Amino acid sequence: MKSYQIHLIRHGTTQANRKGQYIGATDVPLSKEGKEALRRLSKEYAYPGAAVFYTSPLKRCVETCRILYPEAAPVAVPGFVECNFGDWEGKTADDLKDDPLFQKWLEAGQQTAPPNGESGREFTYRVCYTFEKLVEGMMRSGTTQAVLVTHGGVIMTLLSAYGLPRAHFYDWIVDNGCGYSIRITPGLWMRGKVAEVYGKIPENYDGRLSGDSKFIIDLAREAADRAYGGEELPR
């Protein structure tokens, strides 16, 4: 039976990643260091090919796709934008620690949204709806290989919702420029909306983080914990 492979890749590093800022819908570019790191990864490791390339429309994802796949013509999909943190975009948890609305948001988890922003539940619904439409489109067209360059929160949301083996939301955090390959079999997808996670990206990457990368991952984990309140996403 025909199967469909989708390669989920997180964008490269930005200055905001290093600062631990809440940057979701804000359109920031890759940092100089982020671009250089992607070029090193691309040179040293193998990235999967595909027939079609999708990205979040934000610069950091489009730039990542163009560095890793210079011959690609990526299709921007607005539904794969990172969670919108509203009035808190560009701020750190330390900046917001005395804001009572921020404290309420932390306590409520997915139930509430930042001022002029998006709740965890709204974000989850948007991302999952967009992904299911993408899968349906691939099946209709017969496209069996796709790359999706997007954000850490999007990847974690998709894999915690659909991925096999099952794992917690935080277990899917990946380094910038890295990700996972998933395989969708129509029968399993139609019955249970599940996708087999069968490989890490890039191929043969040993997963050892530099001190700088580990620092950024730790910041991402803290931000995710605050944004989603440690709740399990719906499966």
Image (cartoon, helix red, strand yellow):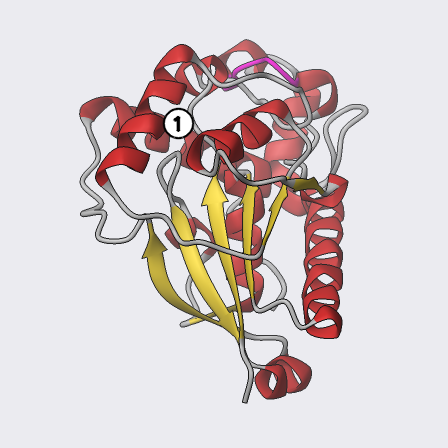
The quarter in which the N terminus is drawn is: bottom right
Q: Which residue range is magenta in the image?
A: 89-93
Q: Is residue 101 visible?
A: yes
Mark 1 residue crowding within 10 angstroms, few (<14) / some (14–19) / many (20+): some
Q: Nearer the viewer, residue 234 or 157?
A: 157
Seen at 75% across and 73% down, the residue is: 140
Above or below, comparing residue 188 to residue 40 in the picture: below
Q: Which residue is mark 1?
A: 219
160 displayed left or right of 109 = left
Total marks shown come to 1
User: Who is closer to the viewer here, 119 or 81?
Assistant: 81
Residue at 43 percent of width and 36 percent of height = 68
Looking at the image, which residue is at 60% across and 69% down?
235
Q: Quadrant of residue 208?
A: top left
Residue 104 x, y percent position in the rendering: 67, 31
Q: Amino acid at mark 1?
A: Leu
Q: Residue at x 25, y 43 (%)?
A: 45
- Residue 196: x and y in percent read 45, 73
Asked if residue 154 is among those painted magenta in the image, a careful observer would answer no
Principal secondary structure, stretch drawn in magenta: loop
User: In the image, 178: left or right of 118?
Assistant: left
